[in-house]
Image (cartoon, rainbow, N blue to C red):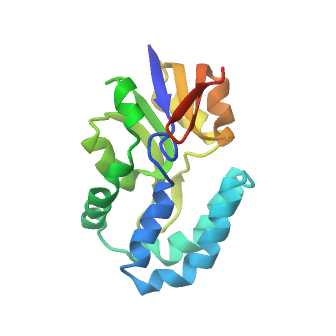
Amino acid sequence: MKVNVYDFDNTIYRGETLVDFILYYVRRDIKIWKYIPKLLVIAVKDALHLFNIEEAIEAYASFLEGYYVNMGDLQESVVDFWNKNEKKIKPWYSTVRKDSDIIVSGTTDFILDEIMKRMHIKNYVGSSIDKKTGKFTRLCFLENKVKIFNALYPDCQIENFYTDSMNDKAMMDIAEHVYLVKGDKVTKIK
């Protein structure tokens, strides 16, 4: 089956979901402040494509193991976060959206679940974190996106892939057509 596949952050969503979620918590919990310098370094390295998968896991480890595991039940916060940030879904997506669309994102699934439900998207995959240990059980990033996509959707071929970043080169390579999204501008590049 041929499908359209989309990255989420800066492609469909205007911004980086994890950064916005952390900023949401900065205003609510002073304990997160000690992680801000390290998280800023991570954000810069990610933006400049200076990570491989192992480095990304290591970079996030102290935050996840030191802060995330102690956050408790996040469902209410996630709902409130999306109440405030759903407006950042780019309008162009609603003009091309299909029920068969698949979102493949580095964003964690506990954050994605709520917005995917609101957008009526049934097929999506994100990174997963073990709530007890703070360790990634799935990191949907770089070439891992292809491995995860192929494992979860073995009968699907990517007809059109939409992304904002060359970090998704591995996904681009397996797609028939590729569209680069910058702001609200969508440009076919393959």
Residue at the (56%, 50%) spot, across then down: 139
Give coordinates of residue 24: x percent, y percent. Answer: 39, 70
Viewer-proximal residue among 53 and 133: 53
Identify the residue at horizontal 25%, vertical 43% (top origin): 118
Q: Position of residue 37 (x, y in %)?
A: 62, 77
Query: Residue drawn at (32%, 51%), measured in percent from left and top?
Result: 86
Residue found at x 42% / y 30% = 102
- The number of callouts visible is 0
Q: Is residue 88 above or below residue 164?
A: below
Screen quadrant of the C terminus? top right
Say above or below: 87 vs 172. Answer: below
Q: Is residue 14 above or below residue 100?
A: below
Residue 97 at x, y percent in the picture: 36, 27
Residue sitting farthest toward the top? 1
Q: Residue furthest right?
A: 50
Q: Which of the 4 image quarters holds residue 73?
A: bottom left
Indicate the quadrant containing the N terminus: top left, top right, bottom left or bottom right.
Answer: top left
Observer-nearest residue: 76 or 132?
76
In this rendering, position of residue 47 left or right of residue 130: right
Residue 108 falls left or right of residue 118: right
